[in-house]
Amino acid sequence: MTSARRTTLGLATALAGFAFLVSSCADSAADSPPPDAPAELYSVVSVADGDTITVDIAGTRERIRLIGTDAPEVNGTTECFGTEAAHYAEDILTGTSVGLVPDPTQDDRDRYGRLLRYVILPDGTDFDARLIAQGYAHEYTYDKPYQRQSAYRAAESAASSAGWGLWAPEICGAATAFSTSPASVAPPSSVELGPSAPSGAATADCDIKGNINSKGERIYHEPGDSSYPETVISASKGERYFCSVADAVAAGWRAAKN
């Protein structure tokens, strides 16, 4: 065999080996899940509304409350955009499986017994964040900050600025979390607001935050509470500042569970 022929055969063998290696790697990559995909998936059994679903975990049905989100209600009084949010969640989640990620800064379950989790789609998409970014839910902080709070608040800000979903002026107007007019969520008429209890901004003497959570609970947060810095007051939802704990209690608010 000539030297030229040996060189040609050697090159052909090397190229064949390289092609096999590339093919093997491609096949392996095709069989691998996306890098952000959840390690374990759970079948979605049902969707209650935008922020609550039921999944099957080892044969047990568990209700899941999405961390950091507050979709308009559809159970009891239907809030503005609640039906649309529920349908959106159903379209995305029905018939699929999801990953569930706990947050070490939050409780394992809420007071209704629901597991508190981030819901992750099979492709690695954070469904909680997607719900907020598309305008189907508000960012929601309960008593203390959660790990993804900054990202969720940024997503809400972008959705609000763009007027997406429930943020569209022609959809819910200023009262984005309610199905009725802003006046319907004002404090009871028996409670005098007056200049000493401003609703839009804190003053030196009136800095107790009166927050309303997704279940309609009125909770006040005092300076020094762990939840105070992250609690945002929205006057359009009927939230306000108080000048004293006595004022807050008289108006129907309770203390935060810090």
Image (cartoon, rainbow, N blue to C red):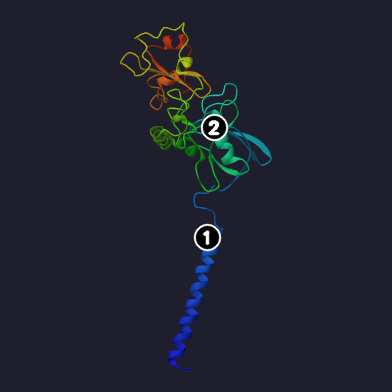
Q: Residue at x 47, y 77 (%)?
A: 15
What SS does tag 1 mark? helix
Which residue position is annotated with label 2?
84
> What residue occupies the far left of the structure in this picture?
204
Sooner in the amino-acid sequence: mark 2 or mark 1: 1
Identify whether 160 is placed above or below 221: below
- What is the x, y in percent for residue 45? 65, 38
Tell which of 255 and 20 is nearer to you.
Answer: 20
Task: State which mark lies toward you, 2 or 1.
Answer: 2
Q: Secondary structure at mark 2?
A: helix
Callout 1: 10 Å neighbours few (<14), some, many (20+)? few
Q: Nearer the viewer, residue 79 or 1?
A: 79
Q: Residue furthest right?
A: 59
Q: CA distance from mark 2 to mark 1?
A: 38 Å
Instruction: Report the amino acid beneath label 1.
Output: Ala
Q: Is residue 131 visible?
A: yes
- In terms of image quadrants, where is residue 43? top right
Characterize the local packing of mark 2: few (<14), some (14-19) or many (20 or more) Cα atoms within 10 angstroms.
some
User: Residue 202: x percent and y percent?
Assistant: 34, 18
Residue 50 visible, this orientation: no
User: In the visual, does 243 lie left or right of 129?
Assistant: left
Three-letter residue code for mark 2 = Glu
Asked if residue 252 lies left or right of residue 244, the reply is right
Measuring from the top left, give residue 133's x and y in whole percent. 45, 37
Image location (x, y in percent) of residue 151: 41, 38
Q: Is residue 96 above or below residue 144?
A: below
**Labelled disc at residue 29:** 1
